Image: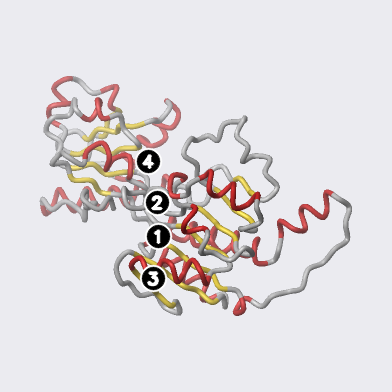
Amino acid sequence: MNNPIALVGELNEQQTNHWLNLLNNAMPGENIIAFEQLTEQQKQECEIAIVANPEPKDIAQLPNLVWLHSLWAGVEKLVAAFKNSSLNIVRLIDPNLTNAMSEAVLTWTLYLHRDMPHYIAAQKKCSWQSKPYTLPNERTVGVLGLGELGKTAAERLANNNFNVLGWSRSQKNAKGVTTFHGEDGLNQVLAASDILVILVPLTENTHNLINSKRIALMKPSSSIINFARGAIIETDSLLDALNKNKLNHAVLDVFEQEPLPEQSSLWQHEKITVLPHISAQTNPKSASEIVAKNIRTYRETNTVPPTVNLKVGY
């Protein structure tokens, strides 16, 4: 029997049991145990942990870990906690999650493209007021971040006839997308976009990436969709721009504090659509199968799957 695998993270009892059932079914030759149920000897034996935003103090009790497999695509908390360690961090790359994100990007881009915020406000006023229709190819959508999620989302937008610009730190390509990179490229995308979609990972370099200086480069008629992390947008600068009609609308699915507190002014702002972090949720069944495949490969070849670069944060 292989050494036990720890399941560690911010999961309640029902969630833990659900994941354990799926993971053990996907890996019948493994012994996956919730962290709380591990004996002291088993903690010493674990070389793999499957994690969902684990507490660093729990991971510290597993001294012989070789690698962690995240159940989420976002790994900024893991990177921050373990950037000075020798642990290998593997993030979840799931085609179902990628497809869900591209679907969400298309959905909420269309929401803005077809002026849904205007019609929602008009209905509340019993106002029968139409707006002129704009063709998709006359609407420029900028996508910040061309990783697995961003590239697929940008290409899906292009397939739906939007004029799509993509930006990344280094040069990347996407089918049907005009791509830019570096600081100058970012400025060009900001200035040209009617709708800006944020899909960059949260790192030291992207914290408050969208600040007052960069918002000032954008068209007053433009809107923002943030499906990345809340801290990528400087909230006060966003609110100031919306209040002064320097931006049209913001669709926000991520926040620095989640759940978003009831007293937050974002809830009731007429130019903000608040979503409860639903743009791309992990599918437990497919995620378990991907984790199982990676662990089987490790057992057979002693090769850790592709890992996060702790220096750049993704």
Q: Amino acid at mark 1?
A: Pro
Q: Earlier in the sequence, mark 4 or mark 3?
A: 4
Residue 76, how many percent across, how many down? 33, 44
Pick the front one: 305 or 254: 254
Q: Nearer the viewer, mark 2 or mark 1?
A: 1
Q: Nearer the viewer, mark 1 or mark 4?
A: 1
Q: Earlier in the sequence, mark 3 or mark 1?
A: 1
Q: Crowdedness of circle 1 by 10 Å Cα count: few (<14), some, many (20+)?
A: some
Q: Secondary structure at mark 1?
A: helix
Residue 153, how many percent across, how many down? 47, 65
Q: Are marks 1 and 4 in contact (CB under 8 Å)?
A: no
At a point 43% along the width and 67% down the height, the residue shown is: 187
Q: CA distance from mark 3 to mark 2?
A: 36 Å
Q: Are marks 2 and 1 in contact (CB under 8 Å)?
A: yes
Q: Secondary structure at mark 2?
A: helix
Pick the front one: 107 or 182: 182
Q: Nearer the viewer, mark 3 or mark 1?
A: 3
Residue 175, how many percent across, how many down? 41, 78
Q: CA distance from mark 1 to mark 4?
A: 18 Å
Q: CA distance from mark 3 to mark 1?
A: 28 Å
At a point 40% along the width and 30% down the height, the residue shown is: 11
Which disc is residue 286 wearing? 2
At a point 29% along the width and 22% down the height, the residue shown is: 36
Pick the front one: 97 or 130: 130
Q: Secondary structure at mark 4?
A: helix
Q: Amino acid at mark 3?
A: Gly
In the picture of the structure, the residue carrying the numbered disc 1 is: 95
In the picture of the structure, the residue carrying the numbered disc 4 is: 22
In the picture of the structure, the residue carrying the numbered disc 3 is: 185
Q: CA distance from mark 2 to mark 1?
A: 9 Å
